Image: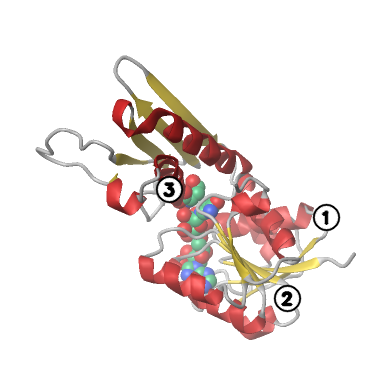
C-alpha cells in the first residue's frame, strides 16, 4: 500500500510540531511538506529538527503550490483565516483537508461547508478519542435528565496562549448537550456572565472559561440538580492525542467521497 503524503500547515506551531513527530511515527503516513505563513521566523528550518523528531530533510516553506503538488492531504491547526483559504485550495485540488483550528465565525463555517462539496474535509474542535466518546455520553445524559431538573454548565481550562473562547471542545460538548435536549445551542447558550445577571435562565447551557499556565486542555460538563451533581470530564495531558486523531482522520478521509466529516464519523461513533 502506498503511503499517504501529508502537508502540515502551521508546522512551527505547538500542534504543527506535534503533528510532524506523530506523522513520522505513523505507519502509512509520510510528511510531504511543512508550511508556514510568509514572514514566519521558522521558514528554512528543518521541520523534524524543529519538532525534536530529528532531521527529516523537509524544509519549512511558504511556497504553497510546490508544497501541495503531489500531496494527498493537508493537516491544519492554525487560524481561521488560513483554514478557510486552504479549504478552498483543497477543494480546487480535490485534497483531504483535516481542520483542527477553532474559533470560526458562522461565515467561516459556511465557507468550509461550501468547500466540502469538492474537498474531503474532516473538522472537529477536538480530535481526541476521549473527547469524542465524552460527547456521546453528554448527549445521552442530557437526553435522559431533560432540561427541567438538571442545569448544564461547561467549564474549560487552557494554557495562557490560547486566543479563542469558549474552546472548540466546549462548543462541541455544548452541541452534544443541545442535541440530547433536542434544542439549538445558539438559542440556549450563555457564554458570559458578569454583574447583576439575575437568576439562571431555565434550559440555558452555560460556559465558563479559565486560562493559565501550560494546561493542554481540561473540560468538564456539569449537570447540576437539586441535591446532586454529575460531572463528566476529560483532561488532556499531551497534544499527541489530538495529532494522532488528526492523522487517523487524514488516512480515513483518503477513501471517502467529498464531504464534511467529523471525528465521530472517523471513529465510527456517529449515530
Ligand atoms: N481540534 C483539536 O483537537 C485541537 C485544536 N487546536 C487548535 O489549533 C489551533 C492552533 O493551535 P496551536 O498549535 O496551539 O497554536 P500555535 O499558535 O502554536 O500554532 C499555529 C501556527 O500556525 C501558524 N500560522 C498562522 N497563520 C498561518 C497561515 N496563514 N499559514 C500557515 N501557518 C500559519 C502560526 O504562525 P505564527 O505563530 O508565526 O503566527 C503558528 O506557527 C488553534 O485554533 C487551537 O484551538 C489545538 C489543539 C487541538
Ligand atoms: O488551543 C488549544 O490548545 C486547544 N484547542 C482545542 C479547543 O479549542 O478545544 C482543543 C484542545 O482543547 C486544545
- SS at badge 1: loop
User: Closer to the camera, 227 or 38?
Assistant: 227
* Residue at horizontal 33 percent and vertical 27 percent from the top: 150
Asked whether disc 3 touches disc 1, contact meaning CB atoms under 8 Å apart, the reply is no
Q: Quadrant of residue 59?
A: bottom right
Mark 2: few/some/many CA within 10 Å (<14, 14-19, 20+):
some
Tell me if residue 171 can be seen: yes
Q: Is residue 199 above or below residue 271?
A: above
Q: How many tags in the picture?
A: 3
Q: Position of residue 260 (x, y in %)?
A: 57, 65
* Residue at horizontal 67 percent and vertical 75 percent from the top: 95
* Residue at horizontal 41 percent and vertical 51 percent from the top: 161
Q: Earlier in the sequence, mark 2 or mark 3?
A: 2
Q: Which residue is mark 3?
A: 175
- SS at badge 2: loop
Mark 3: few/some/many CA within 10 Å (<14, 14-19, 20+):
many
Asked whether disc 2 touches disc 3, contact meaning CB atoms under 8 Å apart, the reply is no
Q: Which mark is residue 71?
A: 2
* Residue at horizontal 44 percent and vertical 35 percent from the top: 143
Q: Which residue is mark 1?
A: 27
Tell me if residue 62 can be seen: no
Q: Is residue 153 left or right of residue 236?
A: left
Q: Position of residue 54 (x, y in %)?
A: 75, 57
Q: Position of residue 145 (x, y in %)?
A: 40, 28
Q: Residue furthest right?
A: 1
The quadrant the N terminus occupies is: bottom right
Q: Nearer the observer, disc 2 or disc 3?
A: 3
Residue at mark 1: C-beta within 8 A of ligand 1: no
Q: Nearer the observer, disc 3 or disc 1?
A: 3
Query: Label 3 vs label 1: CA separation?
Result: 34 Å
Amino acid at each position: 500500500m502506498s503511503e499517504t503524503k501529508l502537508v502540515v500547515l502551521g508546522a512551527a506551531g505547538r500542534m504543527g510540531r506535534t503533528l510532524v513527530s506523530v506523522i513520522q511515527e505513523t505507519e502509512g503516513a509520510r510528511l510531504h511538506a511543512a508550511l508556514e505563513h510568509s514572514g514566519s521566523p521558522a521558514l528554512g528550518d528543518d521541520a523534524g529538527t524543529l519538532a525534536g523528531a530529528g532531521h527529516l530533510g523537509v524544509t519549512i516553506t511558504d511556497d504553497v503550490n510546490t508544497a501541495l503538488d503531489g500531496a494527498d492531504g493537508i493537516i491544519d491547526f492554525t487560524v481561521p483565516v488560513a483554514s478557510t483559504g486552504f479549504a478552498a485550495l483543497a477543494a480546487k485540488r480535490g485534497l483531504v483537508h483535516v481542520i483542527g483550528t477553532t474559533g470560526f465565525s458562522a461565515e467561516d463555517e459556511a465557507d468550509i461547508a461550501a468547500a466540502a462539496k469538492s474537498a474531503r474535509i474532516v473538522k472537529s474542535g477536538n480530535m481526541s478519542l476521549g473527547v469524542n466518546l465524552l460527547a456521546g455520553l453528554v448527549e445521552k445524559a442530557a437526553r435522559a435528565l431533560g432540561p427541567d431538573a438538571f442545569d448544564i454548565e461547561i467549564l474549560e481550562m487552557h494554557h495562557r496562549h490560547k486566543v479563542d473562547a469558549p474552546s472548540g471542545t466546549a462548543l462541541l460538548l455544548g452541541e452534544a448537550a443541545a442535541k440530547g435536549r433536542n434544542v439549538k445551542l445558539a438559542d440556549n447558550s450563555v457564554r458570559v456572565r458578569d454583574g447583576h445577571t439575575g437568576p439562571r435562565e431555565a434550559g440555558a447551557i452555560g460556559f465558563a472559561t479559565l486560562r493559565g499556565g501550560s494546561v493542554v486542555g481540561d473540560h468538564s460538563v456539569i449537570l447540576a440538580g437539586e441535591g446532586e451533581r454529575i460531572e463528566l470530564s476529560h483532561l488532556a495531558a499531551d497534544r499527541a492525542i489530538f495529532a494522532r486523531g488528526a492523522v487517523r482522520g487524514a488516512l480515513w478521509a483518503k477513501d471517502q467521497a467529498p464531504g464534511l466529516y467529523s471525528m465521530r464519523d472517523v471513529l465510527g461513533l456517529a449515530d
